[in-house]
Amino acid sequence: MKNLIKLFAFIAFLGLVIFPTYGFASSNSGPKASGEGVGAISGWSVSEIKYQWSDDSSLISGVSFDLDGAAGTVSVKLNSSSMAYTNCTNTNGYHWQCDFLAGISLVSLDELRVIAVGD
């Protein structure tokens, strides 16, 4: 009987130690976040935007622009329904050139979306 009481006391002691620790760890997990949202993002300003025409006047062969700060990687897309981004090349300082090898149809242009990632 003494062994049973000791076992019960030991189990109760473990419960008192483990339960608060588990509860504390669970409360520190932070908010769960997923999906897409909208909010202000600090970043670069884009200026001096210039489109280059291809030999076929209905196509754009490239776009160049300046950022107001250094970036490591820059990509653009010109059509809001497209999922494809084109990588750009830093040509000098904050100036970037993006070339579209197949050309982009002028009638499909509806945005200039620039994604820049710092160094």
Image: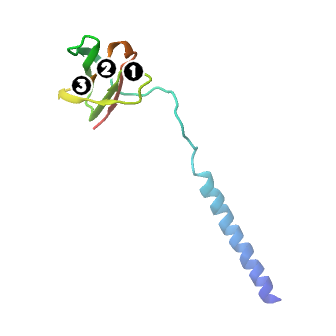
Q: Residue at 44% across / 23% down in the picture?
A: 81
Compared across the picture, whether 105 is left or right of 2 comes to left
The label shown at residue 79 is 1
Compared across the picture, whether 89 is left or right of 77 comes to left
Residue, far top: 57
Q: Using a 10 Å C-alpha cutoff, classify the residue at mark 1 as few (fewer than 14 neighbours), some (14 to 19) or many (20 or more).
A: some
Q: Using a 10 Å C-alpha cutoff, classify the residue at mark 3 as few (fewer than 14 neighbours), some (14 to 19) or many (20 or more).
A: some
Q: Is residue 77 above or below residue 60?
A: below
Identify the secondary structure beneath mark 2: strand
Residue, far right: 1
Res 8 → quadrant = bottom right
The label shown at residue 52 is none
Q: Residue at 20% across / 14% down in the picture?
A: 55
| Residue type marked 1 | Asn
Q: CA distance from mark 3 to mark 1?
A: 15 Å
Residue 79 visible (yes or no): yes
Q: Nearer the viewer, mark 1 or mark 2?
A: 2
In the rendered image, which residue does mark 2 sit on?
A: 104
| Residue type marked 3 | Asp
Which quadrant does the C terminus fall into?
top left
Q: Earlier in the sequence, mark 2 or mark 3?
A: 3
Q: Position of residue 68 (x, y in %)?
A: 27, 23
Res 13 → quadrant = bottom right
| Residue type marked 2 | Ile
Q: Earlier in the sequence, mark 3 or mark 1?
A: 1
Q: Is residue 78 above or below residue 84?
A: above
Q: Position of residue 118 (x, y in %)?
A: 30, 35
Are discs 2 and 3 less than 8 Å apart at CB? Answer: no
Q: Using a 10 Å C-alpha cutoff, classify the residue at mark 2 as few (fewer than 14 neighbours), some (14 to 19) or many (20 or more).
A: many
Q: Is residue 31 above or below residue 38?
A: below
Compared across the picture, whether 92 is left or right of 47 comes to left
In the rendered image, which residue does mark 3 sit on?
A: 99
